[in-house]
Every structure is written in structure tokens, then in C-alpha cells.
Image (cartoon, helix red, strand yellow):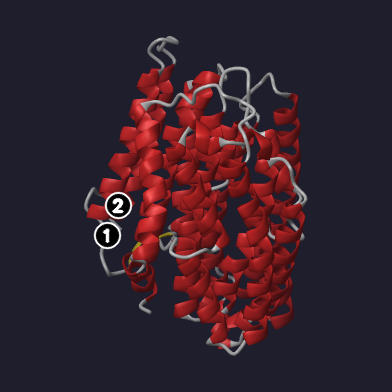
Amino acid sequence: MQYNLASMQPALPEIFLLTAACLILVIDLFLTERTRLLTYGLALATLIGAIGLTVVGAGPERQILFDGSFVRDPMADALKTGLLSIALFAFVYAKDYLRGQGILRGEYYALGLFAVLGMMVMISANSFLTVYLGLELLALCLYALVAFNRDSDSGAEAAMKYFVLGALASGMLLYGISMVYGATGQLVLPEVAAVIASGKADQTVLVFGLVFIVIGVSFKFGAVPFHMWVPDVYHGAPTAVTLFLGSAPKIAAFALAMRLLVDGMGGLLAQWQDMLVILAVLSMALGNLVAIAQTNIKRMLAYSTISHVGFIFLGLLAGSDKGYAAAMFYAIVYALTAAGGFGVIAMLSRKGFDAENIHDLKGLNDRSPWLAFMMLLILFSMAGVPPTVGFFAKLFVLDAVISIDMVWLAGIAVFFSIIGAFYYIRVVKVMYFDKPIDSSPLVASMDTRVMMSVNGLAVLGFGLFPAALLGVCRAAFGA
């Protein structure tokens, strides 16, 4: 294969992002505190440029690069565009928070860009080696970001927990990959799938490896019982890091599950379907029930994340193009709402004060009706209240589950969704019906306000007109 510009065009977004991130890292060394916003502007320009290259290079055909290690297909195009857009929201929301806390440093944006690169590599991974390469690039950046505030003891503790548990999960995933490689003799995912379909591989070894792969995927999602890192990391990390960590990586985790389980081990659908049923029910149950008892809003949203992972698993376990499209729709929608929710919390913080508790949102409507309305839309979407997009995300997943005659599973999902609506509505009640305990004005830059408006209105707009986003998700799987 000739490695020229034409042959590498499908990988241009990744190449551009890598080049720009390295350049930004060097430029930031020569900036002062007064000129630090240049790093922020360059990071946004990089994301916008990568979105443009992804959209321009998109197409219905499937392209394989680098001896089968890298794939560009409609699913990769859609997920990368969504991922880069969510990262754009996260970077804008982070600026005012980091400046207010006195930790506005270029490393945040450099590490963020390298993390986005790792996620894009995971999305386009077509072999076990590429999957692991992207996963570790993402993980190493996130470990550093969680400990970004060097003066925070809770941040250092959270980073250490995340690092130790993340290393354990990565080891399990790698062990599972080695077992599958030992049984099939292949690293490229379609070739692994072909060997499994032929029936020549040792079934016992395959299932043994599959268990460890599912454990690794579940940890990256934060599914029960591999969720122990989620509340502590969300709580301990700076809010600017939590909003990035809690949104964009969910899209990459979905891609990880699709590449490994569907593209590589689709022949073992019956086995991993049973595992995902258990993980989905446990995640929805524990996530929604424990979230009710939380008074810290970051921990509440962490357990909320765990419950939403259960819904994404419902779409995956459906084992059909309809289910995969519904799960992809849910992952993108959740990433959008999570970025907005944590963005509001970041906007409520100021110098010397970090908004973390639910009572910090008391009387938000009196202080800023616009921000309260944006948060209302985001919380209603998480709860699945029409006409927000979260309602349709849940509806499409439930429809996919019912279509494979698992009505009982859909019933469990609806039951726990109703329970989960309580803690979202409680926050709305605090914002609209309680008196504010802090009457200080909310200060936010124009770009932050514009992006928050776009975020909130997108949640409403996709809810009123869900066909556009759903059409993209279904086209990615030919559904």
C-alpha cells in the first residue's frame, strides 16, 4: 500500500488533530497569563477544523487503512462529528470555570485534545491493537486531567482511584483480547468474526475471553458492578474536568462496544447478550435508587450516568441494526445533555466557590431565568420528559427491546425511569420554588452563554424533530 495523501484521506481528521495538539502544546510554553486565551482559541479552531475534515470526508462506503487497523465508515463519521461537537461545548464551558478557580492553564486543552484523539482512534479501530492504543491514550489523558488541580486533595485522591481501577480494567480487557487472539489467531476484527463464524475456534476459550472483554467495556462505561470509580471521580475532579469526562467518553465507549462486541464477536451474540441484560438491569436499578439519596449534585449526576448506561446496553443487547441505531442515538443525546448539565454547574461556580451541592441551585430562576430554563430542559431530557430529546432516546431503545420480545426488560426500564424522574424533578423544584441562598450575580462570558443556549435549544429541537438525528444513526447501520 502506498502511503500518500490520497490514501490517508480517511484518517486526515486524526492526523490534523494530532498535529494541532502538538503545536498547541509547544505554543503554550511561550504564553503568559494574559495571553493564555490564545490556547483556548486554538483548541476551538482545532476542533472546528477536525469537524470540517470529518464531514467533508464522509461517505456511504467503508474504507480500510493501515493493513486493516483503521476503518472509516458511516458510523465512525457520525460518532466523530458528535464527539468533536461535544468536546467543543466542554472546552467553552471550562474556560470561565478554570479562570475563576485560578487554574486556567494550557495543559487542560492540550490534554483534552489528546483525549479526543484517543477517542477518535477508538471509534475507527478495526483491530484489537488499535482499540487498545486509542483506549490507553484516552485513559492516560483523563488520569492527568482528574488531578489537574494540584492543590486539591480530593482531586489527587480521585485520580489515584481512577488510575488504579483503570489499570486493573485495562489489564482485564487486554487479557480477554489475548484469549480471543489465542483462540482465533487474528487481531483484525472482521477476521476474528470470520474465524468465530466458521466454528473452528475453541468455544470455551472464546467465551472466557469474552467475559474479560465485557468487563473492560463495562468499566469504561461505568456500568454496575464496575461503577465504583464513577461517583468518586466525578466528585473529586474539577467541574471543568467532570463535564468533559462525563460526556464525550460515553460516545467513545459506545464505539468500543460496537467494534469489539458487534464487529469482532457478533458470532457470540447470545453469550454477550445475556451478560448485558444483567449489567443493564443492575445499572438502572442501582443508579436510580442511589441517586435519590445524594445531596451533592455531581455525585447525583454520576449515579444518573450509571442508570443511563443501562439504557445504552439495552439498545446494544437487542442485537439488531434498529437496536444499535437506538443505542447510538441515546449515547449522543446523553453526551449532549451531560455536557449541558455540568456546564451549568461550572457557570454557578466562581472564585473561591465551587458549586457542588443541590442547594447551590436554590432560587436559580430568580438569579437567572435563562440559565434556569436551560437546566430545566437538560434535566427533563435526562428524565425522559417529552418534548425533550431524552424522551425519544428512551422510546427508541424500548422499542428495540420490545421488538426482540423482551417486554419484561422494557417494563423494568420504564419502572426505574419513573423512579429516576424524582431526583431530576427535585432539582427543578429547588431552582424554581426555593429562595436563593446566594444573591451574587452570575457572570459568564458571551461565548459561554451562546453555547449554553445552543446546547439547551438543541435538547429541545432534537426532541421536537428527532428524525434528523435518528436518520443519521440509522444510516450508520443501514437500518
Residue at the extreme bottom of the image, as rendered? 405
Q: Is residue 193 above or below residue 107?
A: below
Residue 240 place in picture, x, y as percent: 55, 33
Dot 2 surroundings within 10 Å: few (below 14), some, or many (20 or more)? many
Q: Secondary structure at mark 1?
A: loop
Residue at image point 58% right, 42% down: 431
> In terms of depth relative to the viewer, which is nearer, 195 or 344?
344
Residue 49 place in picture, x, y as percent: 28, 40
Q: Is residue 339 above or below residue 227?
A: above
Residue at image point 53% right, 49% down: 338
Amino acid type of the residue that numbered disc 1 sits on in the rendered structure? Ala
Dot 1 surroundings within 10 Å: few (below 14), some, or many (20 or more)? some
Residue 349 place in picture, x, y as percent: 57, 27
> In terms of depth relative to the viewer, which is nearer, 195 or 368?
368
How many numbered circles are shown? 2
The circle drawn on residue 106 is none
Q: Which residue is mark 2?
A: 54
Asked whether, in this view, residue 301 is left or right of residue 399, the answer is right
Residue 371 place in picture, x, y as percent: 46, 38
Image quadrant where one finds the N terminus = bottom left
Q: Is residue 335 above or below residue 183?
A: above
Q: Is residue 354 above or below residue 250?
A: above
Asked whether, in this view, residue 325 is left or right of residue 430, the answer is left
Q: Secondary structure at mark 2?
A: helix
Spatial CA distance of label 2 from label 1 is 6 Å
Q: Which residue is mark 1?
A: 58
Query: Circles 2 and 1: CB distance less than 8 Å?
Result: yes
Viewer can see residue 160? yes
> In terms of depth relative to the viewer, which is nearer, 200 or 250?
250
Amino acid type of the residue that numbered disc 2 sits on in the rendered structure? Thr
